[in-house]
Amino acid sequence: MTRLLALTFAAFTATAAFSQELIDKGFVEGWNIMMDPALGNGCLIQTVYQDLTVVRLGYDALDNRGYFTVYNKAWGDIKPGQSYQIRFELDGKSFDATAIGFKQDRVPGATVFFTDRNFVTSIAQNKTMTVFNPEGQTVMAIDLKGTAKALEYARECQNKTL
């Protein structure tokens, strides 16, 4: 299993950061472009899939790092603020990561933070992303179509807020 050594993962109390309302900035290629006041007006993209999985890719302007978040009941009994060892795959390439658990509207979620800005670009260059819970069960598998274009708009949004 490949380790994603370039990423630096940080602890984070996600329930506080994700409690404020997001500000809508538009819609591109199936993704909402939004700004999160709780993360220093960091811009993000978010989409909801048919199984009600919610995925966010964004920028935490407070701590100068990126993140991806997955809300899905398949996480099971996630405890807010607790760290979890998870695995995700991009086009079949496997990566280990530390995710921070949280709940929003009673739906469990997990966030992976990273400081390598190129990582978001590498996500967008892939076709699929699969995320596995600590027990190795699939939480979600998504098509990343449209992600690259949406991330361009998120970068523009972020440049305007800096």
Image (cartoon, rainbow, N blue to C red):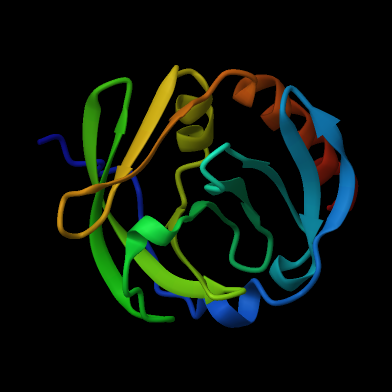
Residue under the image location 20 percent in, 60 percent down? 134
- Please say if 153 is above or below 132: above
Q: Residue 27, how many percent across, how many down?
A: 83, 33
Residue 85 shown left or right of residue 6 in the figure:
left
**Occupied quadrant, residue 37:** bottom right
- Please say if 18 is above or below 44: below
- Please say if 63 is above or below 82: above
Residue 27 shown left or right of residue 135 in the figure:
right
Residue extending furthest left? 1
Residue under the image location 60 percent in, 59 percent down? 64
Where does the N terminus fall, quadrant-wise?
Answer: top left
Front in this rendered view, residue 113 or 23: 23
**Occupied quadrant, residue 89:** top left
Residue 32 shown left or right of residue 5 in the figure:
right
Q: Residue 132, how many percent across, how many down?
A: 26, 47
- Please say if 114 is above or below 130: below
Q: Residue 7, how many percent across, how many down?
A: 35, 48
